[in-house]
Amino acid sequence: MNIIEQLQQKKPSLQLPQETLQFIPGLWVNGKYFWLQDCKEKVLHNEEIIIKVKQEKPHSKIRYSSVFISNHSKEKKEIKLLAMHYYPLVIQDNLVFVSPTDKRIFHHANNNIYLVNGEHNGVGMKEYTAMQQWKVFTDQIWSSLQKGSLNYLPMAKTPASSIFSIKMSLGPHEIGKMNTWTITGSNKNELLSMEQALIKQTD
């Protein structure tokens, strides 16, 4: 377990400038959930899991994050990676909308539209919700905590957050990776065309 002990020191904050969407990764495993607030690495000793986050900015309007999960146990783990996004400034036009048609999440804030999406091994997000900010660190995000099922709500207003989850099966000593991104723009078509270019670039 030396690798786990080495990762105990405090890591740099994930916080981005206040005028953009903030990203907080999380993990559901065995009926429990954890958030990585203000850190880029977390060791879950009881589960023998390590989470690491790498963030990039490939374009001025794009924030791209990769979340790596390492299973250091001798057992297969069925987990769900969580991605929470929120706009930190409390303003009147802050709205989050989950679009099942587009299979994407849209945030409206400060006269901008933000697209939120994610994938694991080429499979996109299938479970998502919009929720008021004060609920996101409570059990109210779940319809079933035991199964790791999110409580589906299609829309939330100021102060609003979005959460999506992606299922992952990790064998013993296996590493999994989820990518998530936010794109800022003035209309939906601009966002979708920028996303298409980003996906081609990262394939």
Image (cartoon, rainbow, N blue to C red):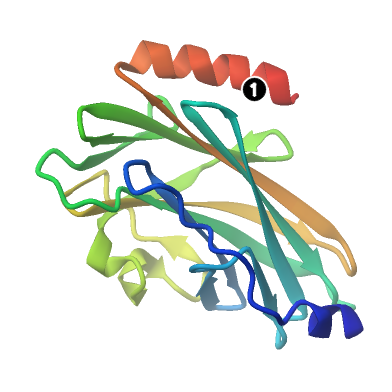
> Looking at the figure, which quarter contains the N terminus?
bottom right
> Looking at the figure, which quarter contains the C terminus?
top right
- Element type where label 1 sits in the image: helix
Q: Nearer the viewer, residue 159 or 59?
A: 59
Q: Nearer the viewer, residue 21 or 73?
A: 21
Q: Quadrant of residue 109?
A: top left
Q: Report the side of 74 relative to 133 (left or right).
A: right
Q: Quadrant of residue 59?
A: top right
Residue 177: x and y in percent read: 73, 50
Residue 34: x and y in percent read: 53, 74
- Crowding at dot 1, Cα within 10 Å, few <14 / some 14-19 / many 20+, comes out as few
What residue is rendered at 60% in x and 64% in y? 12
Q: Nearer the viewer, residue 147 or 38?
A: 38
What residue is rendered at 70% in x and 88% in y? 46
Query: Residue under circle 1?
Result: 199
What residue is rendered at 36% in x and 32% in y? 114
Residue type beneath disc 1? Ile
Q: Report the side of 71 relative to 83 (left or right).
A: right
Q: Nearer the viewer, residue 104 or 30?
A: 104
Q: Report the side of 81 relative to 35 (left or right).
A: right
In the displayed structure, would residue 51 be above or below residue 57? below
